[in-house]
């Protein structure tokens, strides 16, 4: 009588599969967080784009850029509210120029942490307080 051969995976084969999955996860997870943060960062850039246009129209109408708290009645357009960032008060630097900082509301995973984006207009300089943010998110 022949003995039936047992079928299945050896421990080594299972360990190799687990190792491969671990390596793929180590590569994919940081890339996933980067893509998610780029999407959240895009919200701030779109909001900032609306603010730039509103500031230019305000300058044309009033001869100076708006400063202070950004109120719904300050500009000719509703800028809406940002979900992932908070904006500072508008600050006039040298005439005619203005500055705004956007702070990330909730800390992001370890890749970016809590970061602040600073915009100075004109000429339209954007900077970030964290190097990873500068490298990955800024246009």
Image (tube, rainbow, N blue to C red):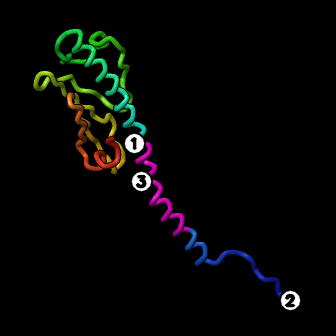
Badge 3 is on which residue?
Answer: 30
What percent of the width, then of the height, locates residue 45?
34, 32
10 Å crowding of disc 2: few (<14), some (14-19), many (20+): few
Q: Which quarter of the rendered picture does the C terminus lie within?
A: top left
Badge 1 is on which residue?
Answer: 37
- Secondary structure of the residue carrying tag 3 is helix
The tag earlier along the polypeptide, 3 or 1, is 3
- Whether 61 is drawn above or below 80: the answer is above
* Residue drawn at (12%, 26%) of the image: 93
Magenta residues, dominant SS class: helix
The tag earlier along the polypeptide, 2 or 1, is 2
What percent of the width, then of the height, locates residue 35?
44, 45
The tag earlier along the polypeptide, 3 or 2, is 2
* Residue drawn at (56%, 73%) of the image: 16
Q: How far is mark 2 from mark 1, CA to CA?
A: 61 Å
- Secondary structure of the residue carrying tag 1 is helix
Q: How far is mark 3 from mark 2, CA to CA?
A: 53 Å
Q: Which residues are magenta?
A: 18-37
Q: Left or right of 84: which side holds 16?
A: right
In this rendered view, identify the residue nearer to me: 33 or 97: 97
Q: Which quarter of the rendered picture does the N terminus lie within?
A: bottom right
- The disc placed on residue 2 is 2
Magenta region includes residue 23: yes
What percent of the width, then of the height, locates residue 123?
21, 31
* Residue drawn at (23%, 43%) of the image: 129
- Secondary structure of the residue carrying tag 2 is loop
């Amino acid at each position: 009588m022949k003995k039936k051969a047992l079928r299945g995976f050896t421990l080594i084969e299972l360990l190799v599969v687990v190792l491969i999955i671990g390596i793929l996860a180590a590569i994919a997870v940081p890339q996933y967080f980067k893509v998610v943060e780029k999407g959240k960062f895009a919200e701030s850039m779109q909001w900032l784009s609306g603010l730039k246009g509103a500031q230019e129209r305000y300058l044309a109408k009033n001869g100076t850029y708006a400063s202070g708290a950004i109120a719904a009645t300050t500009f000719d357009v509703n800028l809406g509210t940002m979900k992932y960032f908070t904006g500072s008060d508008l600050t006039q630097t040298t005439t005619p120029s203005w500055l705004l900082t956007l702070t990330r509301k909730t800390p992001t995973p370890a890749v970016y942490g809590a970061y602040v984006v600073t915009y100075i207009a004109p000429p339209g300089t954007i900077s970030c307080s964290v190097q990873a943010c500068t490298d990955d998110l800024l246009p």
